[in-house]
Image (tube, rainbow, N blue to C red):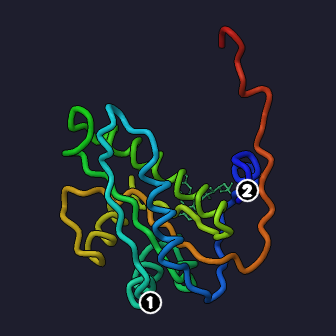
């Protein structure tokens, strides 16, 4: 298993996958990592839909504008937010908390030698409607992100994003 910093600096969006499956154990590890994320008042207002059915992955790839890579992915996970479960019933907390779960999931994928990419669903009402329709989701649940996952076909080069000028010391 890679160190935390190796994983953080190695992770990058992966958009090309081999046809090898993701194992049940790996899926469980991804979901456990996602649910280990922080959340406001520990409300954990998230839900996860795992998809291995090729037909469903293809439907999402076809109907969502920037998720074509899902066609070749053996697994997709939709990370959802439930405002009813969130602190003060706020959509904002639900979305922030579910986004924390997404990042944990992306890092866990890298640590497992898998590749993944966050494809945007929220806050694009048209895309939310597509995902709700394809996955028969209740209207009140927010599909935050659709994350295709698989074994990387190539080697991605992580971007160096550190910028010293983004850091303000003591005052802006
Ligand atoms: C909120 C959000 C929405 C994104 N939506 C998409 C998307 O729809 N399709 C896609 O291919 N990548 C998407 N990405 C991935 C970004 O393009 C990617 O994270 C960014 O270019 C930085 O590259 P890196 O992940 O390799 O560091 C999204 C990322 C975030 C955080």
Q: Is residue 96 above or below residue 121?
A: above
Q: Quadrant of residue 89?
A: top left
Which mark is on residue 102? Answer: none
Which residue is the site of mark 2? 2
SS category of the residue bearing label 1: helix
Q: Is residue 35 above or below residue 38?
A: below
Which quarter of the image is occupied by the C terminus? top right
Picture coordinates of residue 53, whole percent (x, y): 40, 87
Question: Are there few (<14), some (14-19), or many (20+) residues within 10 Å of tag 1?
Answer: some
Q: How many marks?
A: 2
Foreground pick, 149 / 168:
149
Q: Quadrant of residue 106?
A: bottom right
Picture coordinates of residue 143, whole percent (x, y): 34, 60
Q: Is mark 1 within 8 Å of ligand 1?
A: no
Q: Is residue 110 left or right of residue 33?
A: right
Q: Is residue 94 left or right of residue 106?
A: left
Q: CA distance from mark 1 to mark 2?
A: 30 Å
User: Looking at the image, which residue is at 44% across and 69% down?
Assistant: 77
Picture coordinates of residue 145, whole percent (x, y): 44, 60
SS category of the residue bearing label 2: loop
Which mark is on residue 54? Answer: 1
Q: Are marks 1 and 2 in contact (CB under 8 Å)?
A: no
Which quarter of the image is occupied by the N terminus? bottom right
User: Looking at the image, which residue is at 41% across and 52% down?
Assistant: 35
Question: Are there few (<14), some (14-19), or many (20+) residues within 10 Å of tag 2?
Answer: few
Q: Is residue 9 above or below residue 96?
A: below
User: Looking at the image, which residue is at 76% across and 43% down?
Assistant: 161
Q: Is residue 89 above or below residue 103?
A: above
Q: Quadrant of residue 128?
A: bottom left
| Ligand 1 sits in quadrant | bottom right
Picture coordinates of residue 134, whole percent (x, y): 30, 78
């Amino acid at each position: 298993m890679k160190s935390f910093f190796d994983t953080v600096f190695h992770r990058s969006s992966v958009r090309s996958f081999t046809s090898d499956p993701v194992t049940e154990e790996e899926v469980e590890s991804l979901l456990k990592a996602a649910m280990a994320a922080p959340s406001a008042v520990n409300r954990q207002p998230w839900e996860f839909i795992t998809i291995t059915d090729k037909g469903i992955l293809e439907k999402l790839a076809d109907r969502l504008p920037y998720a074509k890579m899902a066609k070749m992915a053996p697994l997709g996970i939709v990370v959802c937010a439930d405002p009813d479960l969130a602190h003060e019933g706020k959509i904002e907390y639900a979305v922030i908390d579910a986004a924390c779960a997404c990042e944990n999931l992306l890092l866990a994928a890298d640590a497992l030698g898998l590749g993944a990419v966050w494809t945007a669903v929220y806050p694009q009402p048209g895309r939310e409607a597509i995902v709700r329709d394809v996955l028969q989701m209740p209207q009140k649940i927010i599909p935050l992100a659709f994350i295709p996952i698989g074994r990387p076909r190539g080697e991605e080069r992580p971007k160096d994003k550190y910028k010293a000028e983004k850091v303000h010391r003591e005052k802006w």
